[in-house]
Image (cartoon, grey):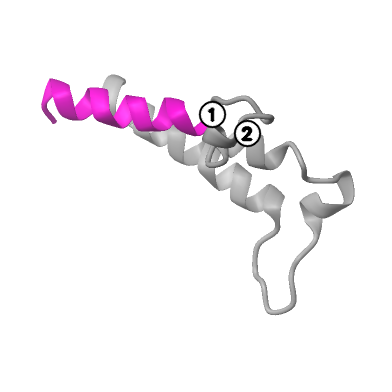
Amino acid sequence: MSRSGIEQLLYGMDRAFEGDPHSIRNWHAFMVNLASVDKADWTWLPPGGRRSIFQLVEEVGRSKYVYDSQAFGDGSV
C-alpha cells in the first residue's frame, strides 16, 4: 500500500473515534454515537437481529487491531 493510501486509511479510522457529541459536524463519529447507548441496550437484540451493540463494537475493535497488524506490524494477525 502506498504512503498516501496508508494516510487516508489512518485519517478515516481516526475520524471514526473523534468528535464532540454536541457538534452537528461529528454526527458520524463512532464514539459519539455510542455515548447515547444505555447500559441495558448493550446486550439487547432487535427482533430478527443476530448481534448486540456490544458484539458490533467488539468486532470494530478487533478489526482495528487486525488493520494495525497488517499495516504497521508483522502481519501475523
Neighbourhood count class around disc 2 (C-alpha, 10 Å): few under 14, some 14–19, many 20 upward: some
User: Do the residues bearing badges 2 and 1 touch, measured as CB atoms within 8 Å?
Assistant: yes
Which SS does the magenta portion mostly show?
helix
Neighbourhood count class around disc 1 (C-alpha, 10 Å): few under 14, some 14–19, many 20 upward: some
56 w.r.t. 13: above or below: below
Q: Considering depth in this image, is 19 or 10 the residue closer to the camera?
A: 19
User: Would residue 4 be counted in the magenta stretch?
Assistant: yes
Q: Kindly identify the amino acid type of the residue bearing the numbered disc 1.
A: Phe
Task: State the residue at coordinates (15%, 24%).
Answer: 4
**Residue, disc 1:** 17
Task: State the residue at coordinates (62%, 30%).
Answer: 23
**Lower sequence index among marks 2 and 1:** 1
The N terminus is located in which quarter?
A: top left
Task: State the residue at coordinates (69%, 40%).
Answer: 34
- What span is colored magenta in the figure? 1-17
User: Would residue 61 be counted in the magenta stretch?
Assistant: no
Left or right: 12 in relation to 30 = left
Picture quadrant where residue 57 is located = top right
